[in-house]
Amino acid sequence: MLLRSLKLTLILLVVCAGLLAGKTVSADGELHSGRSLPPVPTEPFSPSNARTTDRKLILVEQFFPSARCQKCHEDTHAAWSQSLHRNAAREPFYRESADILLRTRGIEFTRHCESCHTPVALFSGALDKSAAKQSAPFTPLDHEGVTCSVCHSITEARLDGTGSYTIRRPALLAREDGTPVYGDFTDEQILADVPGHKRAVMRPLLRQPEFCATCHKVDAPPALNGYKHIKGFSAYDEWQQSGASHESVLPFYRREQRADCRACHMPRVTSTNDRAAKEGKIASHRWLGANTAAPLFYGQTEQARATEEFLKTNVLEADIIALRRGNTGELIAPLSRGGENRLPLQPGEEITAEVVVSNRNAAHSFPPEVRDLYEAWVEFEAVDASGRCLFHSGVVKPDGMLDESTHVYKTIILDEQGRPITRHQIWLTNIKAYDNTINAGRSDVVRYRFRIPENVTTAIPRRGRAGQKGKAFVSPAILNPPSTITLKARVNYRRLNQEYTNYVLKRQNRLLTLPVVQMAETETRIEVRGQRPIAGDKKQPVPDEQQLTAAAKRWNDYGIGLLEQAQYGQAAEAFRRAAELDPHDPNLLINAAMAEYRTERFDSRTAERAQLIKMQELLTRAFAIPQSAIRNPQSLDRARYWQALVWRAEGKRMEAASALARLAEGYPRDREVRRQLGQTLYSSGRLIEARTAFEALLGIDPTDAGAWQLLSPLYASEERKADAGRAHEKYLFWRDDPMAEGIAARFYAAHPQWADERIWSHTHGEKSPPRPTLTGQAAAPTEK
């Protein structure tokens, strides 16, 4: 016991010491981040993570232009020629940001960005101060961006962020042992050795999601920013933890079949002019995503149309699920979707509509990636029977700018002075002040408060006949007629915010209107009643099983959104309502258990531990559902995960560790299972086993700061000083800077109109403060 206590004490001392590492102390004794301009890179590819197999340059002439592939792969070439990969180097909305870096830091620093956008320029040595050209285009192949011979020459993919790949000189043929045979062979020579061609240009790596991660997991290193590693977006990590990957036990929704990046972005399409076609199909090289700007800029209308259709294909879902009365706080839910809701509301009453926006089919966050420039928002409208607008949020104004009080999905990144970065100068980033996004399979609850007017337009009364023949009568309902209000909600998306679009187009001397894509919509109608109750409402038919399942899903999505906003009590109630409607889905009970767990009201010193008891009861009910009735067997693994956490909270660490270890065997790439296993073993004093668990976690994500943090003292406890020092260095590199929170606080103090938005559970109303776009002196500089 003494030895274990000493080891754990050592761990705490090392961890605490790490909190101050990498800091300097100013004259006034205040801690601050040590940030300075990084030195000019001396390595040929730095500050990029990309490299060549032999660490040498690859001449421009050694990259085959896409035209070389076109004759045999006509359909693939046609799709690629309009793709964002083809436009990656030249499209002005990227080029403007990269050119700011070039002007302010020097051409060598642009290698970081160009490793993914203009790789031929990077590997040919064109991005050097001694190069003949110091502005784009840097090489004759820049107009091809990520051309065929780039992707098909990559031999290694790593998960360190931005451009973490290794490339070799392009080859058209390879020997049986994989050795490339260099030279520009004729089509006849290639067709005579198709297996050799496949060995040269195709390898299993190209079919793995880790291949895409090399450019779709972003990191700004100290060599770029003179500060530390700053993590950006990671569509790969989001996918890997989603229900699409089948690699994690935790997602709320799990797809029936595993789907990786190619399933959505490279689906099999019909081909009649491509030698790579199998059974008349090839993998699409359009890589449809969310870029509606670049294809329009280059007049690629087919790509623009296909992109809009892709965005409208059941990616998101919107649902006006509830109303909350302002005078009583009463929640009226669920509202009928698209139908009438006969409610006891009064003219003049203030109500709040609750809209659930769900990320239904994107296997990563919405919006993904460059959220500081994208523009996605919710539009909400309340209209009376005459068409009069009672409330409208999310309006695009005549100048193209978005209403400043709109509920937006975006990121605000700040420089060290607390100024927002508006030109995607990631090399200036210190912290995200705000990041509103919907992760894969999750939901957001958006609230709108408005008042029913006293003179709201009523519905047209209907007359009937009763009593003596020929005598008309007025129905009792006409004496107090209902007033119909239609509520509409839409989720809109525009590739770039209007301010940045205006900036770029002005510099390009171009006129272009980016489309607003409506990705989801819903509406419902409410009948506002007078004080006199209306009798005779028809009874609703008994719903069938499919309708009950759909109703349960609505409550589940609502609960997920509430859970994301830390509204744990309301979330637990929503999940319970869902479970009542669909008693054969254990996930709904598990979700309720999660909500109870996260209230953190339990305490091992108390006798009742009410929340743990509630959680255990819900999990017990989930386990009791007959397996033959469960649609998704993976649900029980979710239950086992949360059961393990209950056991750990109850002090049953051995049982918890055993359960988590079994889950790790079934889900070897579930990072959270590995994390919880490591922490459980650590708290039990089983340090070597804990170290193994954290090492396995780093095999999934080598940038996980928490794993490095605990590995450092664990290595030290084994007398592995060099490994302990390396792990501590990695921890400092990958962790968020704890001192940077002060920068975010400075931003909110300077711009208090953002204060409400910072609270996840907030309401938009007529008095919501506008949040003007911050430019000029209020934003990070672009010319120094």
Image (cartoon, rainbow, N blue to C red):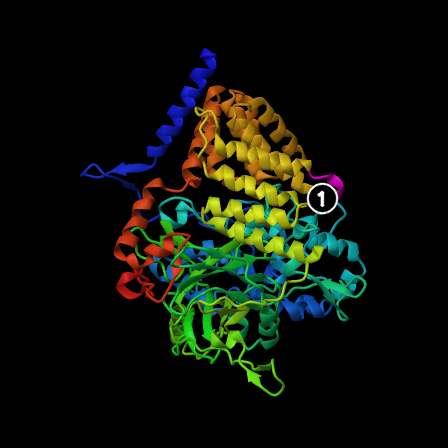
Q: Which residues are magenta?
A: 625-630
Q: At x 28% / y 58%, what residue is drawn?
A: 751
Observer-nearest of 161 and 565 = 565
Left or right relative to 767: residue 117:
right
Type of residue at label 1?
Answer: Ile
Q: Is residue 491 magenta?
A: no
Q: Residue pushed farthest bottom?
A: 470
Q: Quadrant of residue 426?
A: bottom left
Residue under the point 58% across and 34% down: 617
**SS class, disc 1:** loop
Label 1 crowd (10 A; few <14 / some 14-19 / many >=20):
some
Q: Is residue 196 visible?
A: yes
Residue sitting at 53 percent across and 64 percent down?
88
> Which residue appears farthest toward the top when viewing the image?
2
Question: Where 344 falls versus 719 (above or below)?
Answer: below
Q: How many marks?
A: 1
Instruction: Answer whether residue 626 is magenta in the image.
Output: yes
Q: Position of residue 694 (x, y in %)?
A: 54, 31
Question: Residue 503: percent from the left, percent from the top?
Answer: 38, 71
Q: Position of residue 434 (x, y in %)?
A: 39, 53
- Which residue is disc 1 drawn over? 630
Q: Quadrant of the C terminus?
A: bottom left
Pick the front one: 491 or 12:
491
As rendered, which of 339 and 250 lies closer to the eye? Answer: 339
Residue 497 versus residue 460 in the image, above or below: above
